[in-house]
Amino acid sequence: AAAAARARLREDGLRDARNRELMSRGYPPGPPQEAAKKLNLRDINTYMKLHEEFGDIFMLPLGDVPLVVTRDPNQIRELLGGTATERFPRPPNVIANIKILFGRAQIALDGEEHQANKRMLSQWLFAEPHNAKMAEPFSEIVSDVLERLHAAAAQPGGKLEAYSLCELAAADLSAAISLGRLYGAVRTGECPQLESLKICDRIFLRRAMNKRWRETEPTAVTEEFERNKKVIADTFVEGIAKIKGGSPLNHNILAHMVEQNLANRSASCPAGCVPTELETVSNMIGFLAGVGNTARMLTIALEMGARRPDVQERILAELHEHLGGLSREAAAQAAARGVAVPAAGMRELYAYQRLSKLEYLKCVMLECLRLYTPSTSVAPRHCTEPSPLGGFTIPAGTNVMANIYGAHRHGQYWSHPEEFDPDRFNEAAPGEPPRARGFAKEGLFPFSIGGHSCIGRNLAQEFGLMFWAAVFGSFQVTKGPGQPEAQFNTIKSDQILGFIEAVNGCHVSLAARPRDAAREAAAV
């Protein structure tokens, strides 16, 4: 019945007079306007069903100008990669909305201003020595996480709703990178900056879906946005003052930006540039905005580990080998017994060089990011002129969205795309130690691609490896009695093609792993 309904939708779309006129102008097929308006466009499954009927690229004729959606990875590369920022820029109204929250952050800029700021940030964010130094503050967050998890495991059933803890950990991660200190979010269970960000983000996304928000938004909502935005900005202005005042802090990117600002002062630019102080604060707000996706990434791997004891055992074996110092055979035996990694809570265990050896865990991370990519899309792209895409010539003035979720589940490019299979990213020969491949020709875009791709992806992945190593090395994570599997969808997002999250929560049970006293003593 569902298949028949979808087939009728396709037939109606092809027969519809307005659609035929739009297709004659170069648009791909799609449902009729009245049918499109009745669709639940906040449900990612709606788009997957539309792709089944209309192909890799289709239109949604919702307004005067249709919205075009593509899931084809080659089209997504064309839309977002290379020189796409010139051929397919972000729509002016989208950039205007982004600037309201993010000011002059690099994500809110285009052209040479964006490139200059991204180069400045990349000098720090993509440099291995800086990444290695961040392992120390990251391990402090992980220590706080383990303390919370031991308390949960000590309770009857060891029950935990994982996302809320992952969100607090992601907030502390943002503070560690940005400010050289933690918010204490995991330790205290509170983070005012995070709560203010969530309020601002909710209002920001609603504005993005309403071109007339300036006319229709209640004054109380506007004031709420400005009040919470100030809480966030004040935190970073205070951080700049501490750095300039010589306060002792951990390694952080804010110090790098302050240093670059001072180095770029001149007679023509006495206050400094690339970054200006406004750009510095704006970039910090941009980093904080990444908390949600980091939390989703952390949560997804815990959920999949709980569902798949076989995957969890292989992770544990790898941890015993590379963090515990056992041979491959002995590590496999220890993992089969479910024994904890010796001194799994010791910060020294998570040095950057050790984490880089966790190849199977990297495969698990990549598969989680493929199957449940936290951002199912990115900001729409705008056709400034008639643009060939997927065999169609999309008329000028049209917005196009990339369905990254759909690309990651495309049956033409991925085998058994609906299954969770970390070994799809393992390029080692059978019997050899795992080796995660660095490039996925099929098209893997969890951090987007091109000029506006996620600039914090290296540190997010580094922290993810450390977080999962500590958790799976210390606890058996399972689905306890009555704990449903997390349902990942976008229906809670305030925009179309929004964020994947566990809409019913991520509920798991924890049991502290038995410890090998002799090996613990030797490790210490």
Image (cartoon, grey):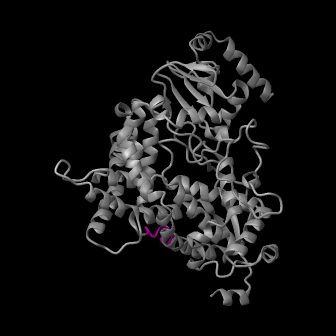
Residue found 63% across the figure and 18% down from its top: 32
Residue found 69% across the figure and 16% down from its top: 12
Residue 389 figure quarter: top right
The number of numbered discs placed on residues in the rendered structure image is: 0
Q: Indicate the position of residue 234 as horizontal and vertical percent values.
A: 31, 58
Residue found 50% across the figure and 23% down from its top: 398
Is the N terminus in the top left, top right, bottom left or bottom right quadrant? Answer: top right
Query: Toward the viewer: 2 or 65?
Result: 65
Residue 108 figure quarter: top left
Is the C terminus in the top left, top right, bottom left or bottom right quadrant? Answer: bottom right
Query: Toward the viewer: 326 or 511?
Result: 326
What residue occupies the far left of the structure in this picture? 267
Q: Is residue 332 found left or right of 322 in the rendered image?
A: right
Residue 183 shown in magenta: yes
Depicted 42 relative to depicted 508: above or below: above
Q: Indicate the position of residue 261 as horizontal and vertical percent values.
A: 28, 56
Q: Indicate the position of residue 53 as horizontal and vertical percent values.
A: 72, 25
**Is any atom of residue 489 visible in this view?**
yes
Query: Toward the viewer: 450 or 366?
Result: 450
Q: Indicate the position of residue 84 as horizontal and vertical percent values.
A: 50, 33
Look at the image and give the residue range highlighted in magenta.
182-188
**Is any atom of residue 402 visible in this view?**
no
Residue 261 shown in magenta: no
Depicted 76 relative to depicted 273: above or below: above
